[in-house]
Image (tube, coloured by chain):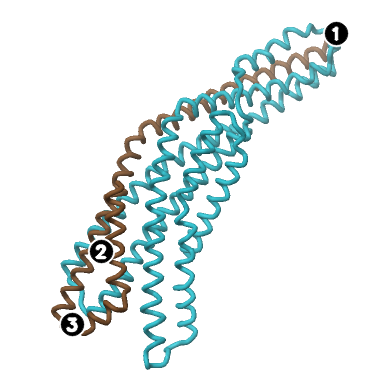
Amino acid sequence: MDRTAELLRTVKNIETYLLLSRDFRAWLQHRSPKEKALWSDKILEIMTYRMQLENKQLTVLADAFDKLAPELKTGTAALKEELTKLEKFIHAIDTLSKVVGVIAKAVKVL
Amino acid sequence: MNIPRSPLIIPAISLLLMSGCVTAPPKSEYTALAQAGSDYAVAVDKVLTAAGAAHVDATSWSLVQVKDMAGVVSAEKYSTLAEKEKKLLMTMRQLKESTQLLADYFAQLELLSSADAPGETKDAVGHLVDSMNKLADEVHVASPELFKALPQLAKIAVSTRIDAALQRELTARQTLIRTQMLLHEQLLKEVGENLASSLTTEAALRDELLVRKPLLSEKPLDSPEDWVAKRRTAMLLAEESKDVKDASKAAEEMRLAFEQLLTGKDVENRIRALVGRIRNILTAIHAVNS
């Protein structure tokens, strides 16, 4: 991972130089159309390589996340189940309140 | 009429016993962590979306620059580049899906930790309060204050049960959450850096192609107002990337808040810092998008 990151930094620096350096731009202005086309290809190749490295870095992470996905889904399901149990518990309180209400009415009648 | 106390006290006390009395941090801390977790997942999703868009824009500006400098771009080289960029965007989508799973988890945690979750809790306890009060008024009980306080025990029982469930879940899943957060630190570091790099490249190329070139040309500016607006965009774009670059610190704050919660330490300040960091990320992303 660290080697990829280091390589990525180097490639980015080269790409930035080729795209933004005024010296390189001035030099390229005086080249033949064939040479310009060659440099155009080179810059696109460097950009493509940089994207490959970025993708490599992110794929390592995406795969690691995928491995954790089943357990995370299990956790979410367990929380849902807990919520259902809680609903039943609250339902029991509700039932208790109704029983107490009936007792209160009965006591009033007596 | 005298009603013996014990038969009515027993169910209320049973509620407490059934709930499982455990030592746990105050529920508000669980709620705060769960809410921060949900907000965090939303922020990560937005960072990934912004990073994808910024990547495509930076590539487009780079291609415009190549065309401007060399006068030609090969169809074959462009197709290869576009293919690789699509693959990268697909990986980012995969990461967004993983983030969604984390968001689902925290959303469920938030639902459970919320004092009003489910909504019937208040109603059920409220009904019990009314019924007990009526009964206390109707009958002569030895300790009416204690009798009227019984519904509060039910409320505490629900709250204690929620706390116990949350503590059980977070303890059982601590390795998973810790690993998730460590991966997120790495993810946000890389994506944040890539996003900042894309924005810096875009800003530099906008400056070169839309600001310097027309300004230094001998031709008069087509529209001075447009030029001023373009210069402002180019100048501010690079600045806005700085907050996003620090996005990985939000993942670190999240992990540390979780660790402190598990050890029963006060997490209020940590969560406040986390919420502030999430807010900064969202502000930066909003600025980038707009």
- The answer to the question of whether label 3 and label 1 lie on touching residues, with beta carbons closer than 8 A, is no
Query: Gap between marks 3 and 1, in whole Å?
Result: 109 Å
Q: Is residue A10 above or below residue B141?
A: below
Residue position marked by numbered label 1 in the rendering: B1
Q: Are marks 1 and 2 on the same chain?
A: no
Q: Earlier in the sequence, mark 3 or mark 2?
A: 3
Q: Choose between A17 and B153: the one closer to the eye.
A: A17
Assign a secondary structure to mark 1.
loop
The percent position of residue B141, horizontal first and vertical second, equals: 84, 11
Snapshot quadrant of residue B150: top right
Task: For chain A, give the colour.
Answer: brown
Disc 1 marks a residue whose amino acid type is Met
Query: Gap between marks 3 and 2, in whole Å?
Result: 22 Å
3 or 1: mark nearer the eye: 3
Residue position marked by numbered label 3 in the rendering: A31
Residue B69, disc: none
Give left or right: position of B62 versus B46.
left
Residue A47, disc: 2
Q: Is residue B10 above or below residue B65?
A: above
The percent position of residue A85, horizontal first and vertical second, equals: 53, 23
Query: Gap between marks 1 and 2, in whole Å?
Result: 89 Å
Disc 2 marks a residue whose amino acid type is Met
Q: Are marks 3 and 1 on the same chain?
A: no
Task: For chain B, give the colour.
Answer: cyan
Assign a secondary structure to mark 3.
loop
